[in-house]
Amino acid sequence: MRHTLSVWVEDEPGVLSRVAGLFSGRGFNIESLNVAPTLERGVSLMTIVTAGEEQIIEQIVKQLRKLVTVIKVVDMNHTDCVDREMVLIKVNAQDSYRAEILRIVDIFRCKVIDVSHAEMTLEATGDRGKISALISLLQRFGIKEIARTGSVAMRRSLQAET
Amino acid sequence: MRLKGARVLLECLMREEVETIFGFPGGAVIDIYNELPEYPFQHILARHEQGAVHAADGYARASGRVGVVLATSGPGATNTITGVATAYMDSTPLVVLTGQVPTQLIGNDAFQEVDMVGISRPCTKHNYLVKEVESLPKVIKEAFYLARSGRPGPVVVDLPKDVMNAEMEFYYPKHVRTRSYNPHIEPNSKQIKKAVEYICQAKRPLIFGGGGVVTSNSHEELTRLSRELQIPVTTSMMGLGAFPGNDPLWLGMLGMHGTYTANMAVNHADLLIAVGVRFDDRVTGKLDTFAPNAQIIHIDIDPTSIRKNVAVDVPIVSDCRLALQALLQELEEKVEASELARQYQSWREKVEEWSRTHPLTYTKSEDAVMPQQVVEKLDELTQGEAIITTEVGQNQMWAAQHYRFLHPRTWISSGGLGTMGYGFPAAIGAQVAYPDKLVIDVAGDGSIQMNIQELATAVCYNLPVKVVILNNTYLGMVRQWQDLFYNKNYCSTCLEYSPDFVKLAQAYGAEGYKVTRPGELDDVLRQALFSPNTAIVEVVVPQEENVYPMVPAGAPLNEMLLV
Ligand SMILES: Cc1ncc(C[n+]2csc(CCOP(=O)(O)OP(=O)(O)O)c2C)c(N)n1
Ligand SMILES: [Mg+2]
């Protein structure tokens, strides 16, 4: 099963290779990995999407926690969270396709961020399901290039009880 | 006090109460060596950096202290890697200091530059590249703390040459503050209660100790647990010495070359009390048939060890000693020990019967010295009081099987990595830690040649280490596998040519002895063991003797080859 792990790490040289090396060295898989600074100085947040049986995921979490530069690990699957990914898609857009592509842009609430006579570059944000659906819809026009950020995730705020 | 980096480093080592450094110099660490004579450290100059690391490792395992290594950049650093990986697999606390090219040259493929932090990352507990002299004290403080706390392990600190020459106002931090590393050492009391319930319900309990018992100095607690409740004990190879080998409750070692009794006991036990173990494949055999009837209590300080290989009923993440103390306390309050001992009576009888019917055996010979006999003789002559190190292969297994280890830290062997060439330098390190103890490396003719250069080190520092080579003219353990599983296709395992070990010893200034007949064994061993000098005893043993019992790799533990 797919798990999204939020991993807070010391922001220092080599921390990425420690985490990536742990995954490759132990044969764990990484579907996507995203790293960026947090509000706290010196702390970065890595969001890692991985897949495996429960026992493997448990090992991954424990092994991550064992790394000296890892501050905290949360398996977001065990929380109520929102997750999003951003994707840039460069798609064939001859005149005959344009209207249809723009309709999809509208439905998926994407943005057109670059356009030429033959191509269009779209920006979309959403959860995994939405992004996959978008990509599969655009496939028939011919996708030329794609760049994805990988997921980032966050716990939902507690809702006031009513 | 304004000091150069090199001095800052040595001041830090003083504050960590380091007494001994195992090292080998070079351009990148020459500045450190330049200051070294001003300090009271004992520096042991090895003849190869691998030897230096294994020596520091043997020193650490024998004494329980952190072993310290100093090596130069590039090839000096890469030469340490086998030693570092060996220490990592067996959780030995080391601080390995390596030189590095000046910071402004890093990344330029400078002379003798390697990315030591990159190379050592997967085989260290943690590692550091020190880029500014100001961070040096904090890094060294952390390095020692990490090496010895929690599950111990090696820490590499890479030291660029310019940092060793930069100056700073010296200070040494009192405390280590990391927001991330915080080993969990106290047992959860609910889990302890649960463990006691399991122990009370058990009919056929078995204690299974490992290297963690030795590391955490909890052998006394483990022994008390066993003796008070009369529960039989086995250990992994790494756990030898954690329970006295002459106790009637001792079943011998578990696993691939474990005793019949220990392997059968695991198979039949209804409760396994596993302490400081990680269920390595050499111990479990085929995983799904391991301890098929047992519920498992697993105590270990490393959460990743728990549920990595086997499912556990009562996981206890804790320092083994604290957990065992809590367990003993809870048992004392809750149960009548003698009653439980009675409850396990018929189980003990069953176990004793296995021991009676299937003891460790071998066939003695009139005219050949058997390797097992050599180890038994060592046991007899030293009364289990020597520190035994080993190389890797059959020699290691025979030493593990036939020497009766009475105390922790007297068995020093490369378990996890299985590093040939470990035993001799490790013996040197153990001897440095305990100059007055008898330290014996049980060696093979193959392994001993992997770090034979350390004879110079032993002789130079008057270390009376004894090396007993079981010479079967083979890479015996590999030959055994070829014999049993590869149709006796003895490809590249025969060591047709070896040096004359007696002359070799003498050439280095050590004593050399050779034994070829059973009648000579006692005399020669006595002479060598009680000599004040470094000595090699080469014992010619039959070429094709195998180690038994043997559980073939991946087979269930009860499917042992017995002879
Ligand atoms: C550095 C290293 N290389 C290779 C091996 C594989 N290996 C395991 S046991 C063994 C044979 C060792 O021969 P020897 O030292 O003569 O011991 P014996 O088994 O004959 O007692 C070998 C080659 C190893 N463990 N370590
Ligand atoms: Mg041999």
Image (cartoon, coloured by chain):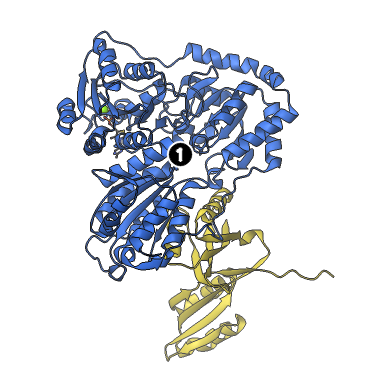
Q: Residue furthest top?
A: B366
Given residues A124 and B414, the one toward you in this image is B414
Quarter where residue B469 is shown: top left
Of residue B384 and residue A78, the one placed in the foreground of this image is B384
Q: Most extreme residue toward the right, as rendered?
A: A162
| Chain A colour in the picture | yellow
Q: Position of residue B55 (x, y in %)?
A: 33, 40
Asked whether the viewer can see residue B310, the reply is yes
How crowded pointer 1 is (Cα within 10 Å; few <14, some 14-19, many 20+) is rated as some
Determine the residue positioned at 53% across, 84% down. A101
- State the residue at coordinates (50%, 56%): A67
Which residue is at the front of the view, B341 or A128? B341
Q: Is residue B523 above or below residue A37?
A: above
Element carrying mark 1:
loop
Image spot of residue A18 (x, y percent) = 44, 59
Placement of the C terminus of chain B among the 4 image quadrants: top left
State the quadrant of the N terminus of chain B: bottom left
When asked about the image quadrant of residue B331, the answer is top right
Q: Quadrant of ligand 1?
A: top left
Q: Amino acid at mark 1?
A: Gly
- Whether residue B157 can be seen here: no
Q: What color was chain B assigned in the picture?
A: blue
Q: Is residue B221 left or right of residue B429?
A: right
The answer to whether A141 appears left or right of B329 in the picture is left
Q: Quadrant of residue B462?
A: top left
In the figure, is residue A154 to the left or right of B442?
right
| Mark 1 CB near ligand 1 (8 Å cut) | no
User: Pointer 1: what residue?
Assistant: B64
Host chain of mark 1? B
Compared to A143, does B185 lie above or below? above
Residue depicted at 57% across the width and 26% down the height? B223
Looking at the image, is A97 positioned above or below residue B383? below
